[in-house]
Amino acid sequence: MRKEDCIIYKGIFFQIEWYYDAEGKSQPYDYYESCDLTQKRKFLMLCQRIGDFGKINDITKFRNEGDGIFAFKPQPDRYLAFFRRGKKIIVTNAYRKASDKMPPNEKILALKNMEDYLNRNPDMEEETK
């Protein structure tokens, strides 16, 4: 994935981007591509809302999961992300919700991907929300 291909949405408040690893692979993008049009539309509407308005007050749609990780929650999917300086949100991984609790391995993967991203982009540290 090229850097310019990673942009999901450019809004007034935030630009939302896909995380991709050092080899250019992006698990959340691949997951998104496997979704049907209705699922894609739900996620993109959330990206547009936070991008243009700077927040989503409904915790059933966007929630702080702790440790700097946030979740976009278009049913039945979850897209985990973090904020970074420069008014960007990086979507680290995605999965289909199967239970009320987030699987621990998904948050671990989000944190690992966040660390990898920040190590490869040292001038762009995590922004606290």
Image (tube, helix red, strand yellow):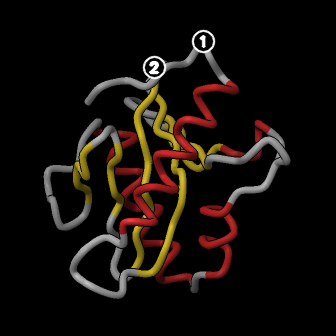
Give the amino acid type for the residue marked by disc 1 in the picture. Answer: Asp
Where is residue 103, by image quadrant? bottom left
- The front one of 116 and 92 is 116
- Mark 2: few, some, or many residues within 10 Å (few <14, many ≥20)? few
- The spot of residue 4 in percent (x, y) is 76, 38
- The spot of residue 109 in percent (x, y) is 52, 56
- Mark 1: few, some, or many residues within 10 Å (few <14, many ≥20)? few
Q: Nearer the viewer, mark 2 or mark 1?
A: 1
Residue designated by label 1: 123
Most extreme residue toward the top is 123
Mark 2 or 1 closer to N-term?
Answer: 2
Q: How many marks?
A: 2
Q: Residue at x 40, y 61 (%)?
A: 45
- At numbered mark 2, what does the secondary structure look like: helix, strand or loop? loop
Q: Residue at x 57, y 86 (%)?
A: 36
Quote the CA–CA distance across marks 2 and 1. 9 Å
Q: Compared with residue 126, is residue 94 higher up or lower down, i.e. above or below?
A: below
Where is residue 31, by image quadrant? bottom right
- The front one of 127 and 32 is 127
Identify the image quadrant of the C terminus: top left
Residue designated by label 2: 85
- The spot of residue 35 in percent (x, y) is 58, 82
Q: Compared with residue 106, is residue 96 higher up or lower down, i.e. above or below?
A: below
Give the amino acid type for the residue marked by disc 2 in the picture. Answer: Arg
